[in-house]
Every structure is written in C-alpha cells, then in structure tokens.
Amino acid sequence: MKYIKQLLAYFGFQYQGKPSRLISRVGRTEIRRLFNDGLFVQRVASGELVAVLNGQSHTKPENRPANCPHCTHSQEYTYRDPVTNEDCAIVHCYRRPDGTIGASGQIDPHMVIVAGVEYHEPRVPKGALTPKRNLIRKLVRKAWRKLKFRARQVRTWLVGSNQ
C-alpha cells in the first residue's frame, strides 16, 4: 500500500483511503477547462444536476469586486447528481441583488469530479509566500535598505560636521 501511495503521489494524485477516489492538484485554468467541458452550468439549468447552496455571506465593501453593488452576496454551491446523490463540483459566485452573477459574470469552480478523479487547486502551505506577498516583501526590504543607507549618510554628515 505504501508503494501505491508513493506512485500516486509521484503522478500528482493523492490516495484518500476507503472511498477509492483519486485527488489531483491542478491549476485554476485546468479546473475551469474541465468545468466548461463538463457542461456543468447547462446540466444544472436542464435539471440533470442540482445546485445545493452551502453557504452565503454579505460581502464587505473592501472585499467586494469592483462591479458589484451593495447587498452582493458571496455564495458557495455544490453541484450534486440527484440520482446517485454524489457531488460533482463545488463552485463560488458573487450574486448581485438583481440575481445576476457579479465579478467576472461567470461561476468560479473550486473542485470538479470527472471520471472518478477529484480535481482541486494546489494547496498553499500556511505562511507560504504568494507572488503578491513576495513582491510586497521585496519592496519593503528595498525601502528598508534605502532608509538605512540614508540614515547612515545623515549620521556621517552630522558626525563629520561636528568635528
């Protein structure tokens, strides 16, 4: 069993134990492609799948996308097959007060199950630097170095003028 887990991990899959479902970590674009190719939105509209609301919350002004008005809700849905009662996808959207989808105007898939394989985004380890965080950190370091350099210049100028 140990070797099977290692082999699956080598190819980007993760073993989940008894329910034999493989998990693959892929990027957002790949998840979106799988979601669009699976025609999940059309299948929900036709009644083949059921959208179950997992949770919703009022978006704060600082977290709300630019084109979304006040009273926009952040909602997460699970698309479920009513016959087998199995999950097919987990999606997120910003629902405007008039009922339309905000932000990009599209539903954002977070997890998709295709042919018995769960496709998720890669995990970001706690405390890991995202590209944006890394850029901010570099800019702060650069500004700090400049500040220390200027402080040294001022100190040598003050010490040099007192002699």
Image (cartoon, grey):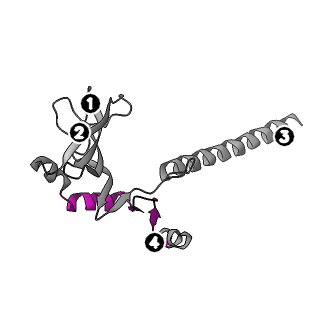
Q: Disc 3 or 2, which lies upstream in sequence?
A: 2
Residue 25 lies within the magenta run: yes
Foreground: disc 3 or disc 4: 4
Query: How far apart in space, not on screen, are marks 3 and 2 (Cα)?
Result: 62 Å
Circle number at residue 160: 3
In the displayed structure, would residue 137 be above or below residue 64? below
- Residue topped by disc 2: 102
Circle number at residue 72: 1
Secondary structure under the numbered disc 2 in the rendered image: loop
Residue 113: quarter of image: bottom left
Q: Nearer the viewer, residue 7 or 28?
A: 7
Q: Is residue 80 visible?
A: yes
Q: Amino acid at mark 1?
A: Thr
For image coordinates 27% across by 51% down, the residue present is: 86
Q: Amino acid at mark 4?
A: Phe
For image coordinates 15% across by 53% down, the residue present is: 43
Q: Disc 1 or 4, which lies upstream in sequence?
A: 4
Q: Amino acid at mark 3?
A: Gly
Q: Residue furthest front?
A: 18
Q: Disc 2 or 1, which lies upstream in sequence?
A: 1
Q: Nearer the viewer, residue 49 or 75?
A: 49
Residue 58 on image: x %, y %: 32, 28
Callout 3: few (<14), some (14-19), or many (20+) C-alpha neighbours within 10 Å? few
Foreground: disc 3 or disc 1: 1
Apparent side of residue 123 relative to residue 30 in the rendered image (left or right): right
Foreground: disc 3 or disc 2: 2
Residues drawn in magenta: 10-39
Callout 4: few (<14), some (14-19), or many (20+) C-alpha neighbours within 10 Å? few
Callout 2: few (<14), some (14-19), or many (20+) C-alpha neighbours within 10 Å? many
